[in-house]
Image (spheres, rainbow, N blue to C red):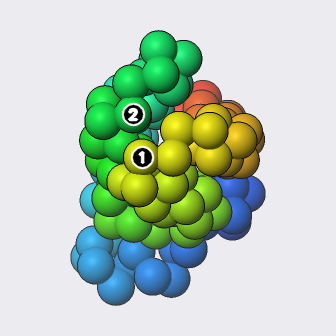
Amino acid sequence: MTIEECYVKMGANYQDVIKRLPSAKMIEKFALKFKDDTSFQELETALNEKQVELAFRAAHTLKGVCMNLGFDHLYKPSFEITESLRAGNLELGLQQFGAVKEQYTKTIDALNEFALENE
């Protein structure tokens, strides 16, 4: 699997990110680093603990990383939850978290498969 095929599998926008990052190797490097990003786990913990401000910061970070990497499929629900939490709407944020989690899992699964095939 190539990094472009990985992007297709997860529903990400490879054509957009290749405009910002000059090579497939660089995209690969930064996409794989996403697995180490803790913003999703921080978001989940903050939501479980009902800490709106911490949840907002984590969602905002996740949204930004997704935008930079062309992870449009994860960016969209991250944007929505960020805006709900920015407004202080914890209940709506909790409802929206399922969509974030679904796309995050899809992303991590595709990246893990890519990493395994390219060891």
Q: Quadrant of residue 56?
A: top left
The amino acid at mark 2 is: Val
Residue under circle 2? 52
Residue 117 visible to the viewer:
no
Does 118 appear above or below 60? above
Q: Residues within 10 Å of mark 2 (few under 14, many from 20)?
A: many
Point out the tag, 2 or 1, that comes first from the N-terminus: 2
| Closest to the observer, 116 or 15 | 15
Classify mark 1: helix, strand or loop: loop
Please tell me the numbered disc located at residue 45. none
Residue under circle 1? 88
Does 105 appear above or below 15? above
- Number of labelled discs? 2
Residue 69 percent location from the top left of the image: 39, 62
Instruction: Give the residue at x 42% y 46%.
Output: 88
Quote the CA–CA distance across marks 2 and 1.
6 Å
As drawn, is 21 to the left or to the right of 24?
Answer: left
Instruction: Give the residue at x 60% y 57%.
Output: 77
| Closest to the observer, 84 or 14 | 84
| Closest to the observer, 53 or 24 | 53
Q: Quadrant of residue 115?
A: top right
Instruction: Give the residue at x 70% y 41%.
Output: 95
